[in-house]
Amino acid sequence: MKISIAMATYNGGSFLEEQLESISSQTRPPDEIIICDDGSTDESLEIIKKFENKVDFNLYLENNLENLGPAKNFEKAISLCSGDIIFLSDQDDSWNENKIEFMVKELLSSGGSLAVSCDCWIGNREGIPIEGTFGQRQTAFRTSKYKTRPGACTAIRGEARKILLPIPPGIAHDMWINLLFKTIGSITYLDKPLQTWRRHDANSSQGDVPDVNLERKQEFLLKNWSRNSLCSCEKRIFRLKKLEERIKNCEKEITLIKKRKNNLCDAHNKIQKERRRVEERVQVLKNKGASRVYRALKAYGKGCYSDFSGLKSLLKDILVTK
């Protein structure tokens, strides 16, 4: 059983050494680390080369000729891995020493899942857990029925690359991993936190940043509330189209790996139902005034907001007109 780690780096020198050390301290060390660097101008490359000289497993560093961005950089790193199981790794987290060992056992005993994703502590810039776990926050603050995890909490079977790659342009790798494997019923979510997910001002995503000041938090909440829901829904429809295309194009591979064709019928039905609900919300958002209120309440009664944040999304559609 060969274990690979796919890591994407870009100017992560402030935290990279700590993450690499947490990987080298694993109770089940990896067999290889593939690092794709997206044009770092800080000390990241020096840290990686120094680390390579003191570990027993293979480390391959790929320097991108042009900046690919996080999703395509991860795509490249995953494509270069040769392991039976591939772990995704951010450059600024810190893993529990038993993460690889625990997740490998869970994936192998999952009954055919192509991916497994652990929970994680949300840490500040110093890597100190201060706001509970990602799963706890998701349960506390979202009424959506869908569970997700950061991409860096995920491990996939090597054969799953045929389905996962390439990542469609305009879709974050985290989102694509959760969306694809969840739709075909092939990801196992663990409630056990096995790493610290460090949040700070330099993260490529700013979803949860617990160590910024109150003013920044208020700005984030206001931006989230006033976000253009119509634009968000149209992007979601785009993602669903790409998802349906991928499942259709990879039908043979999915059936061969999962050995159950009926899963694909279920997947197509899920996509079509969700797309109809999103399209109905789009029609709500294209109206104004009393017409929008009427359509929104009607859509809510039909369960169309169950794919969003329920009552919170309904109130937003009624009260926010931009």
Image (spheres, rainbow, N blue to C red):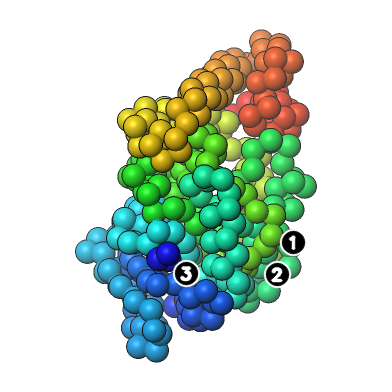
Tag 1–tag 2 contact (CB < 8 Å) = yes
Q: Is residue 15 visible?
A: no
Question: Along the horizontal axis of the image, is 52 left or right of 239?
Answer: left
Disc 2/disc 3 C-alpha distance (Å): 17 Å
**Which circle marks residue 91 in the picture?**
3
Q: Is residue 232 above or below residue 203?
A: above
- Amino acid, disc 3: Gln
- Amino acid, disc 2: Pro
Q: Is residue 315 above or below residue 46?
A: above
Question: Along the horizontal axis of the image, is 267 left or right of 227?
Answer: left
Foreground residue, 312 or 160?
Answer: 160
Tag 2–tag 3 contact (CB < 8 Å) = no
Q: Is residue 141 above or below residue 17?
A: above
**Residue that numbered label 2 is attached to:** 129
State the quadrant of the C terminus.
top right
- Tell me which label, 1 or 3, sits earlier in the chain: 3
Q: Report crowding for label 1: few under 14, some 14 to 19, many 20 or more residues within 10 A (C-alpha).
A: few
The secondary structure type at the circle numbered 2 is: strand
